[in-house]
Amino acid sequence: MAKFVFAMNQSLDGYVDHQAFAPPPALFRHFIDDVRQLTGMVYGRGLYEVMRYWDDEVAEWGPAEREYAQAWRSKPKWVVSRSLQHVGPNATLISNDMPKALGQLKAELAGEIEVGGPVLAHSLGALGLVDEYRLYMHPVVLGGGSPYFAGARPTLRLAATEQVCEGIIRLTYVTA
């Protein structure tokens, strides 16, 4: 059985914003290694459209960006959306009966499936499908934006803490 994991960068005041703070090189390396070990990713439309950036080659990329793109492209993606008509390479569109489709994925696959985006994580959490929350805490205060938790928080238990790199701590919570 697969484990659904919601993992995102977060500011000290609880917001996620991929444009507000970029990961330093050591954290980016951590993310490359993390993506390599994933079984796949589940995205909502919004974050999937942001992550499609990695589908195309960008001339200005350095070796780390190329390595991340290669790892990301190699993984299957499932995109939950009622508005999208098509998805890119190595992606499957889930437009109907999301609970059933993702429940089947969880039952049929092994390993970790990353859940992308606070709104989707909230929906899946309400269905009891998210097994683990990984908060990458950055020493930044944004003062607003999209909160890491898009709604009522599930009852969680701290399972681990790790300093991933200078100034950034990963807090791992499991559902209680």
Image: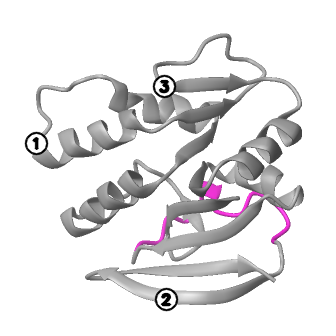
Q: Magenta region, mostly helix, strand or loop? A: loop
Q: Secondary structure at mark 2?
A: strand
Numbered range of the magenta stretch: 140-153
Question: Residue 132: which quarter of the image?
Answer: bottom right
Q: State the SS at label 1.
A: loop
Going by the numbered disc 2, the residue's amino acid type is Thr
Q: Residue at x 81, y 71 (%)?
A: 153
| Residue 62 drawn at (x, y percent) | 10, 42
Q: How many marks?
A: 3
The three-letter code of the residue at mark 1 reads Gly
Decide which of 111, 160 is in the foreground and name it: 111
Q: Which residue corresponds to the image point at 55% horizontal and 65% vertical from the top-left?
A: 143
Residue type pointed to by label 3: Asn
Q: CA distance from mark 2 to mark 1?
A: 30 Å
Position of residue 63 measured from the top left corner of the image (x, y, whole percent): 11, 44
The residue that mark 3 highlights is 90
**Residue 161 badge:** 2
Q: Is residue 149 magenta?
A: yes
Sequence-wise, the earlier of marks 2 and 1 is 1
Q: Give the SS element for disc 3.
A: loop
**Is there CB contact under 8 Å for labels 2 and 3?**
no
